[in-house]
Structure formats: structure tokens, C-alpha cells
Image (cartoon, helix red, strand yellow):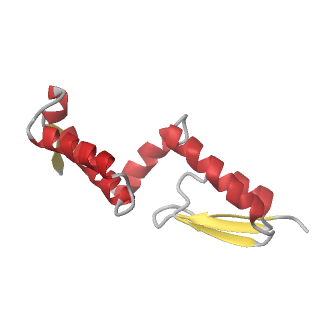
């Protein structure tokens, strides 16, 4: 199947998520700025490339994940921030067992291995991974 996409929709979605994340305690001035940016997008203002329709192939979930997993762990500021927070939390977790549902590429497995006795993880369409620390 072929999908029709425009970056404009994605940008609007991100702004909407930003509004939800800050509601109801966020700064009203920042919310107003975000809503104004959304209005500009809806009015067609901005980089014309964001409004061009693109046709992309809809991939099977397993195929799309397999393709994405090849680059997912590359330098990514979101992963850097997530890992910093996660490692801080994992240090506080007592040794034991863990299950990581939807473990993705398994990049967190090393951190789990350092802090736990055993872990198991996987995805619905992939093999499960597991380890158990030797006695």
C-alpha cells in the first residue's frame, strides 16, 4: 500500500503533543506561542517542502522495524537523554530479575545485565533474548 504524507501533519502533531505535555501547568505564554506556530502551519506558512505531498510505501511492521533497527542506536539525542535517565534509575534497582517487553534493538540489555541477575525481553515479531548471570 502507498501512503500520502506531508511533514506539516507531523509538525502539527508534535506541537499538539507539546501542548498536552505542558497542560494544565505550563506557561500560558509558551502555549500561546505554540498555538500560533500551529496556526502558521495550518495557513501554509513556512518551508514549502513541509507542505509537499510525498508518497511512501507502507511496510509490514516486522520489515519496517528490521530496517529501522539498523540505524536506531546511532547517535541520537533522544536516546542519549533517555539512557542518562534510565541508567540513573537502574543503579537504584536491587539485583533481581527483569522483563523488558518491546525491548527494541536490545540496546538496554547491557545495562540490565550489569544491574540484574537475569533479564528477558523481546518483541511480538522477533525472537526473545534472555540471560542469566552465572551462579
Quarter of the image holding residue 5? top left
Q: Please say whether residue 108 is visible from this viewpoint.
A: no
- In the image, what residue occupies the spot 55% across and 41% down? 73
Residue at the extreme left of the image, as rendered? 43
On the image, the x and y values in percent for residue 65 come to 42, 51
100 sits left or right of 102 in the view: right
Q: Position of residue 101 (x, y in %)?
A: 55, 68
Q: Residue furthest right?
A: 135
Q: Is residue 113 left or right of residue 4?
A: right
**Image quarter of residue 81:** top right
- Residue 112: where, in percent of width, then height? 72, 59
- Choose between 45 and 6: the one closer to the eye: 45
Can residue 99 be seen here? The reply is yes
State the count of labels.
Answer: 0
Work out whether residue 116 or residue 56 is closer to the camera in this orientation and state it. Answer: 116
Q: In the image, what residue occupies the spot 10% across and 35% down?
A: 44
When the figure is inspected, residue 28 is found, relative to residue 48, above or below; the finding is below
Q: Position of residue 72 (x, y in %)?
A: 49, 42
Q: Is residue 128 above or below residue 111?
A: below
Q: Residue at x 13, y 37 (%)?
A: 53
Q: Is residue 115 above or below residue 95?
A: above
Name the residue located 91 percent from the left edge and 69 percent from the top edge.
Answer: 135
> Along the line of sight, which residue is nearer the eye, 45 or 65?
45
- In the displayed structure, does residue 117 sit left or right of residue 33? right
Relative to 130, is 25 on the left or the right?
left
Amino acid at each position: 500500500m502507498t501512503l500520502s504524507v506531508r511533514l506539516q501533519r507531523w509538525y502539527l502533531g508534535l506541537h499538539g503533543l507539546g501542548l498536552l505535555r505542558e497542560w494544565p501547568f505550563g506557561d500560558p505564554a509558551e502555549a500561546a506561542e505554540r498555538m500560533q506556530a500551529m496556526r502558521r502551519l495550518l495557513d501554509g506558512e513556512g518551508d514549502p517542502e513541509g507542505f509537499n505531498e510525498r508518497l511512501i510505501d507502507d511496510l509490514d511492521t516486522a520489515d519496517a522495524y528490521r530496517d529501522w533497527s539498523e540505524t536506531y542506536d546511532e547517535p541520537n539525542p533522544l536516546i542519549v537523554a533517555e539512557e542518562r535517565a534510565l541508567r540513573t534509575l537502574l543503579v537504584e534497582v536491587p539485583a533481581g530479575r527483569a522483563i523488558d517487553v518491546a525491548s527494541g534493538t536490545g540496546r538496554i540489555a547491557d545495562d540490565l545485565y550489569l544491574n540484574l541477575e537475569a533479564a528477558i525481553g523481546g518483541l511480538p515479531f522477533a525472537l526473545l533474548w534472555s540471560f542469566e548471570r552465572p551462579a
